[in-house]
Amino acid sequence: MIQLSLQVKPVITFLASDVEGSTRLWESQPEAMSKALLRHDAILRQAIEEKGGRVFKTVGDGFFASFEHVADAVESALVAQQALATQSWETDRPIKVRMAVHAGPAEVRDGDYFGPTLNRLARLLAIGHGGQVLLSETSTALVREGLPPGCELRDAGRHRLKDLESPEAVSMLLHPSLGTSFPPLRSLDSLPNNLPRQTSSFIGRDDERRLLAQTLTNSALVTLTGPGGTGKTRLALQVAADAMDAFPDGVWLVELGPLTDPALVPQAIATAVGIREGTNLSVTKALVEALRDRRTLILLDNCEHLVSACAEMVEELLRVAPRLKVIATSREPLNVRGEVLVQVPSLAVGTGRIVAADEALRLDAVRLLVDRAQAANSRFEFTDRQAAAAVSICRRLDGIPLAIELAASRTRALSLEQIVERLEDRFRLLTAGSRTALPRQQTLRATIDWSFDLLDSQDQTLLRRVAVFAGGWTLDAAEIVCEGDGLEGWEVLDGLMRLVEKSLVVSETAGEDARYRLLESVRQYGIEKLESEEEQRLRERHARHYAALVVRAEDGLQGPEQATWLERLEREHDNIRATLAFCQTHPELCEYALSLMGAIGRFWTVRGYLSEGREWIESILACAPKGATEAKANAWRTAGQLAYWQGDSAAGRRFGEESLKICRELGDRGGETRSLFRLGFACLSEGDLPPARDYFEQALRLGIEIDDRPGIPHLLNAVGEVAYAEGNLDEAKQRFEDALWRFREAKDMRSIASVLKNLSNVARDEREYAAAHRLLAEGLSIRQELGNATGLAVTLDAFGLLAGVQGDLERATFLLAGAHALHEQSGSRPEPAEAARIDALRAKADEKLGSQVFDTIWEKGLAAGADNASRVALEEGSPAEARIPAKVV
């Protein structure tokens, strides 16, 4: 049971109810049942509320209520049962309600309760009969001396509930007004099965359990697939236990893990089901005859190493036994007709930054980690201080339950922070598994070894090779990088399909293309299996491929397909990082990295990777071989671009000068044009307008001379920015409009948004506020579509300044704060021409609104997020009509 230290949860008493046989009544007498349920609900609600309880949830015709004291819950149940028993019901038989009482801590979220206590309550309720009130061992101990007058408790024995955990000591409430003659409780002990007791709680998987229950209703064979360690067996056992009432002839687990001989599969099934070979019948025929008319559920666990034998046996049984259902767990499908595959995913690990313990515990993976850590170490405390480390562990282990449980076992000796530090060597760290588990389930390495050893040599080779990819890959990339040395390019697709089927490679859809990835633990395993020479060759091919991809993307980032290319580069960013890291340690390959960095500037700027990009460029240029190359000049220019958006004008000028020097040395006139352009912006950001204009006009003349059509509109816009900074609005407007139609013709959406913002500045200064708002709104829409974090920040700055000159200081403050938050996230700064205006407006708002009001609005703007800030920005009308949305405020 998970408990937060320093915030001990109180014990809460819960009462649950459920109408017995309600489904049949609804199907046969819907009108009468509808009327009966109205009275049932009124009786339950009154009995609960009169005793101080609160109904916090209804599920179907069942009630869930919370109480402060067990005695109140028991008395409420008694009163409700007495009232229900005296009713004359519209249905042809009385409405009978089973009830259960349990107590323990629980998580509270949005007025509802969650956690093991509620799960145990539901399991206890499920074993009862209409008219019964059952109490758990905990609630029995708490109420023993406080029972309502005339009540006593009868020991109903210890019963295994469908959560498969330790048996529960159950008591039944007795009173002269209640019945005493009931069938045996419907626990696992009363139903034919061989499901093993579980020594730990089942956590999460609510969606998967519902899906599997529905699938099992409609299908004869359901196969749970997924990588080793994802919890296929535990999930299958829980689903089988949940479904037990539907299989009066038994639910039988067949453990195939220890088996090595395919011929023994029929015998293993027969042994589990309790069928013996007849005198004149083989085991298979005896099974067929015995199961022909039975309503039975068979769980075949760990089929992957015996797939053919399992498939043959299942197909034969399902052919002759129409009431038989089979759940199989396997790392690959059985490929039997009618088989429904259910991929068992890793546990949820969430996204974004999480620093609070209660927020972290909403993630199933973290709940599992904490539960198992507290089981391993009774002194383990989970507080806000551990939340970030817990989330990091779960994410780095891909939410794989086995890996998380192995990590949790290390809390006997290590803190969560220490475990995070040691996850780079996860195969050495994650070894302390259960001694009673199969050997291949005792360590993370053994689990992956098992799957790897089942592959043929060609698929083993492919698995090793795709491990060089970081963050996933496309089929094209795999064919280029992995072919050779015994593996042809055309064989890669078939190999990937086999690895997907065997749950070693994950297939996903990204846009219109299929994309593949390895779980991080499998990727590290594959890297370990690579020999050094093989790894060197693969990483060179990998670097060459991704450098070429980024160079190819450069033109795409300036045309109508730029949104597509931005998303593609975002998906490949981890591979790009891997390329840069490899080239950094191999100077002879630096040219790949330099060409990549020279082409990726727009992506890094748009998506806010300013600091990271500069660090890569400066570190790789420092170790690159001597000599002037076009790739070096391009890389210096990219560094200058990033420095500009960071507000580092001195570095921007230095980088631009390095680029210009190389281009002139090489006679690269196109590169010279772009270097002059960068130097102009470096000067502009320093407020040094004469040299800025000189650089831009030199670049424009040279661009026209060499007919640099893609570059000319950028240069026109740049000259316009100098003119605007000089206060020459007419020239600025003319230059911006000349640039805009060219960008529209080229469908360069990012540049269109930039020029629209510049034109809005002119309109604002000319007091054309409606026009300024319209121009900014169009640009904002483009920025949002492109996911342009830096551009969004700049646009919100402009909206804030527009609100300021219109006198709406509250909205201006909110928008400037939203922009500030985005600048902080992306590492950017306001545009130099606007920075002084922004500072002045902030000071004015602080003075006019008062520091307390200003600070309150500023904090709300910081916390609003891009979407909320954008909604506020787009409000039209007079300043008095514009309001910050209440949910933001």
Image: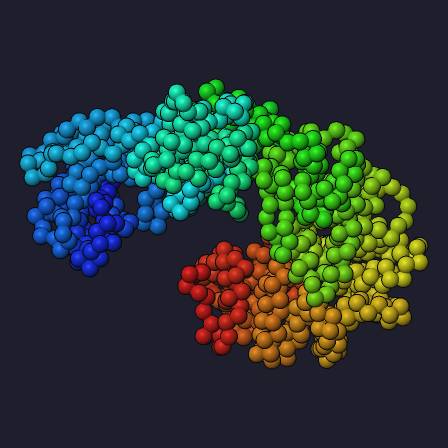
Is 234 placed above or below 541 here? above
**Location of residue 217 by image quarter:** top left
Residue 746 in view in this figure: yes
**Residue 124 in the image, given as x and y percentages of width and height:** 26, 35
The one nearer the camera, 590 or 168, is: 168
Q: How is the image coloured?
A: rainbow
Total numbered labels placed on residues in the image: 0
| Image vertical order of residue 16 relative to residue 526, above or below | below
Seen at 20% across and 39% down, the residue is: 129
Q: Nearer the viewer, residue 551 or 478?
A: 478
Looking at the image, which is closer to me, 53 or 717? Answer: 53
Q: Residue 17: where, in percent of width, then height?
A: 22, 44
Residue 801 falls left or right of residue 686:
left
Q: Quadrant of the C terminus?
A: bottom left
In front of the other: 441 or 717: 441
> Residue 366: in sight, yes or no?
no
Q: Quadrant of residue 838?
A: bottom right
Q: Position of residue 412 (x, y in %)?
A: 47, 23
Residue 34: percent from left, percent from top: 20, 57
Residue at (72, 60) in percent of width and height? 557
Outermost residue on the front side: it is 280
Q: Is residue 42 above or below residue 276?
A: below
On the rendered structure, is 87 left or right of 354? left
The residue positioned 27% from the left and 51% from the top of the image is 60
Residue shown at 13%/48% (left/top)? 94
Left or right: 105 in relation to 156: right
Q: Quadrant of the N terminus?
A: top left
Is residue 706 toward the left or the right of residue 413 in the image?
Answer: right
